[in-house]
Image (spheres, rainbow, N blue to C red):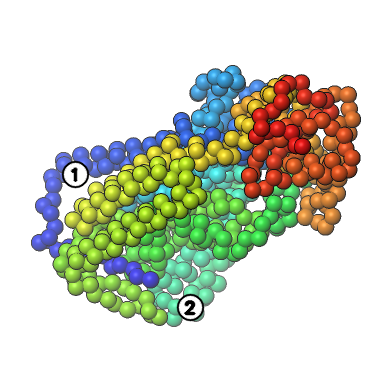
Amino acid sequence: MSLYNLQTPSASVQQKQPSRLARIAVGMLARLGVLILAVAATLGAVWGGPRLGDHEAIVAECARNMRLTGDWVVPTFLDTPWMRKPPLPYWIVAAASYLLPDDPQLNLPVTTAAARLPTAVSALLTILLLWHLASSMFGKRVGMVTALMASSSLAFLLYAANATAEMLLTFCCTWAFVHFWHGVTTRRAWMRFVHMMLFYVALGAGMLAKGPAPIALTAFPLAVWWYTERPLRLLAHLGPGGWRQVLTCFGRQMPRQTARAFTHLYLVPGVIVFAAVFVPWMIAVGRQFPHAWDIWNWQYFQRAQGLYEDTRPRGIFYYLPIMIGLTAPWIFLLAEAVAAPWLKRYARQRRGLLYAGLYCLVGLAVMSMMAFKKPYYILPAVPPLMVMMGLVAERFYAFVPTTMPVKLRMWFGRWRDVVIQDPLRFAWITWAIVAVSAILMLIFGNFWMNAHIPKVAGALTVIAAGALVVLLWAGLLHVWGHGGWALGLTAAAVVAAFHAAWYTCGPTLAAESSERVRRLDEALDRAGVPDNANIYWVDARPDARLSFYYARRARYTVTPEETVKFVGVNRTRAGVRELLEAHVLEKAEGMMAAEETVYLLASYKEYNKARSRGSRFQEIARVKCDPDNPDKDWMVISNRPPMGAASLPATQASP
């Protein structure tokens, strides 16, 4: 690993300093430019792009039901109490829907834009928090650079337009992270109290956003930092040889830090404030639905232990490449950022770097030890990493390549000094290597896209080629000594390329998933199934998009609450799956024998199982879902014959 040691050029190569008024004007324009880019990056994808995914549609549908029923305490999804997830995302989406018009086709509140707007605003507020925190830690220039990098990072571009709870949780965790730093660094007692109370409020809001996630991603990492900050700073100063002094320091300051947790962190009143944010909602729901406590146990604690039916084997390092990828396109700064807390040239910023670095590291470690893993669970650990990378980026882009020698620190078993005699020539060679590599990647990427996503391969290649031209030009600007312009142009190019792909290619890429729901609605129309007919999903959770986009009354055959009552919270026990399948099939057969007209939707695999048992039903339609796996096709059956015309060939009934 190579870590650069950038040096400020001598006065002979520095440009003439502008006047104070010009510096103020340039600074204001730079701040305005960063703010505009942050707004465009986060809010720009709200009013277009692909339709909502299934999980996004759950949030939107719950928010719509709150508007329609007026019940803002217990969320409902498909006429079923949906207390498995906290209500804050639904509350915010429902509130945002008052600012936007209703769906013109369904004449119902909450549209796609209304569902995405709160997450986009959460992303923008998170970027502003990072701007503020980096400025207070490392200076105003680093604050602007951090905001610029965060706005153009894959983490914020991807999840600012995602209507799930992830970005809202990220905002709450970052909000708590910022206030904790100010609470422990301010010298004024009353300011410390205000910041710490806001920290507990933010932590409680995170619980309302996504359950216990803030405990693992925020509270525990900050507790580790609270007890290890001084020993780690001593370790960075003394090196590995001072481990005895470090252990002594850690042992001696444990009682002191524990006492200060009550006097400086206001632990007792803070825990009361923290609980007051989310516990009242839990009590209100628990009184109305006593089994809610079992639902929460199943959703959170059983899931964390891997006792969840959707648990997949994922290794201990599962999150590491995901976290690295979310920092793109700034990955080249990551190595220096991770090593920065231990490097002498960052000694003055060491406390802030250790604060952010330990937060990321401990959060990553805790989530990696969880048995149940999803790629987006690690998102709240990324913003502090952007703060560290912002400090490194400010130093990197301030460097002007000249012919003056520059010293590098490189690791070959131990740190060694390497001198580059002509940094300007080295910069040109590096730029040429990067340019050739990027062009080759573009060419091979085009071949790959033509083989796997041919419908959008041409458009994505054009967008990537345009972005590559701008990025290479930004690299030239850096070589020529215009690092600020290079940084801004890189960020703007990435944001523009992402939004171009989002609006032009996003709908096509997501069409396969959303198209099957549309085909299902068409099949139901052709079979004469009324819009208000009861449609029960037999062997899977109903796809929320059928209700959200087509106002179909899709329901559970066996609700999650019934499932918990029937088999308990641990569904991974031997024989539980077979027992549950038999129970669902028995209930479905009972519906088929009833007088009321009902429609059941099941996979072709389960449909064949029912047919082999001799179950009697009318076939309504078959919807193709996966061309390579017919067992995943959707079969619509009923206890009454279809009232309409035959379905399209793609959705016709099984022979």
Q: Position of residue 598 (x, y in %)?
A: 80, 27
Q: Write down the quadrant of residue 547 in the picture.
A: top right
Mark 1, mark 2: which one is toward the viewer? Answer: 1
User: Taking 464 as reference, is 529 left or right?
Assistant: right
Residue that appears at 49% across and 46% down: 453
Amino acid on which the number 2 mark rests in the picture: Trp
The reply, left or right, for residue 166 in relation to residue 291 is: left
| In the foreground, 572 or 71 | 572
Rendered location of residue 422, percent (x, y): 18, 70
Residue position for label 1: 23
Q: Residues within 10 Å of mark 2 (few under 14, many from 20)?
A: some
Residue 451 in view here = yes
Indicate the secondary structure of the residue bearing disc 1.
Answer: helix
At a point 62% along the width and 60% down the height, the residue shown is 314
Which residue position is annotated with label 2?
A: 243
For the residue marked with disc 1, what is the amino acid? Arg
Residue in front for this viewpoint, 584 or 227: 584
